[in-house]
Amino acid sequence: MESGNEAAEQSWKGSNGDDVKTCSEIFSDRGQVGLIAMGVSFLIVGVNFALKVILVALIKELRLKTVTLETNYTMITVFVGQFINTAILIVLNNASFKDFDGGNGPASLIFFVGTETDFSVTWYKTVGTTIMRTMTSQALWPLIEFGMFYSIINFGRCFDRSFTSDTFNTKSPSVQAYIDTYAGPAYLIHYRYAAILLQIFVAFCYGCAMPPLYGIAAVAFVILYINERLLVCYYYREPPAFDEKMTMLTLELVTYIPYVMLPMAFWQLGNRQIFESVVTEIEFKADIRLSEHDFTSAFSHMDPTHMTYNSGPLWLLILIFVYTMLTKWFGRGGEDEEDEDDQLVEGLADYYDALKDDDKNSMIG
């Protein structure tokens, strides 16, 4: 059986007996659409990189008091910007809110371009595949970034020594300029934390609908781990000493994943086209196909006496929220909190209290 261009060039007998050739244009158009979709994925990754550079520069202009505070602000802003660009904008750009406001509400006036009313089959074929390609590209980005910048740095070093192998032959006007040329780039630890958070949040946000995202995130972590272990030793400059606050802040942000994942899973599992075989008719191909999936139909699955396939995520979210509130009100009320403004306090006792009795007596005496 022929396929691709060979199938397009085959001749067939039509119903009227005439010789007809399979339309080759449809195969060409499908190939162009695939290239455009791949280009969009790489474009999103490129915009994420540009966002990182811009936000890092803007945070530096704030001139915060400490390096730790600066890196914390940078990590959060980079992560939020990249998450919106990767996981939210593409969904809203393709979304239609005609099921909720009939096409005349404020949401439909703002997002008037999209045609996807729910997480339907066409949504997975268009938006879902784009998210998968983007996260795959994002997982490979550390390797691409290293290859790109390593080539640029090496070209600068070769130019400095007039493209010879003698490293003592240099055009640098001073010793410090020579060191800057042959030293590695600065290690941006906040960018790495932001990349980890991006993979985690996107995977859990859409992983219920697209489980391969969990595997992509795992591969991304392996690549990032090996890449960072090697480059910190052999490529980057020695990073400054950081305390544990950025790590603790990252772990704290991860605790908010259920509040993103479970509502998304509840809505994804409530798609009536896939799980209930409810499909509305359309008159023309360009018409928007309504999903019949609105708040009324969605929350009908929350009846405790009649639990359904997608009741679990929202009930679990409610239980987590109640448990968190009870823990916050009754479980942590007596703990002493560390002063966040005092950057020198890191859980250590006061100087006088930490002294031994003999030292205290010598001070008093």
Image (cartoon, rainbow, N blue to C red):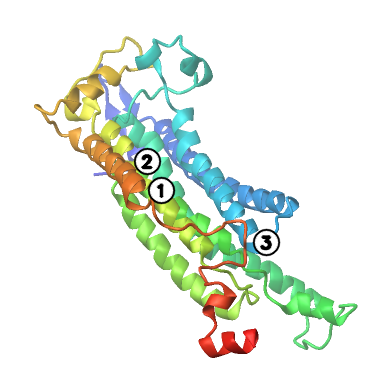
Q: Which residue is mark 2?
A: 260
> Which mark is in front, 1 or 3?
3
Q: CA distance from mark 1 to mark 3?
A: 28 Å
Taking the spot 31% from the left edge, 17% from the top edge, the residue there is 290
Q: Is residue 278 left or right of residue 200?
A: left
Q: Which mark is residue 183?
A: none
Q: Which mark is residue 201?
A: 1
In the current view of this chain or complex, which residue is farthest to the front? 365
Taking the spot 47% from the left edge, 16% from the top edge, the residue there is 108
31 relative to 58, above or below: above
Q: Secondary structure at mark 1?
A: helix
Q: Earlier in the sequence, mark 1 or mark 3?
A: 3
Quarter residue 160 falls in: bottom right
Q: Residues within 10 Å of mark 1 (few under 14, many from 20)?
A: many
Q: CA distance from mark 3 to mark 2?
A: 31 Å
Image quarter of the N terminus: top left
Of 318 and 329, which appears nearest the observer?
329
> Which mark is in front, 3 or 2?
3
Q: Which residue is mark 3?
A: 66
Observer able to see residue 9: no
Image quarter of the C terminus: bottom right
Observer able to see residue 342: yes
Q: CA distance from mark 1 to mark 2?
A: 8 Å
Q: What type is the residue that disc 2 sits on?
A: Val
Q: Are marks 1 and 2 in contact (CB under 8 Å)?
A: yes
Q: Residues within 10 Å of mark 2 (few under 14, many from 20)?
A: some
Quarter residue 360 falls in: bottom right
Q: Secondary structure at mark 3?
A: loop
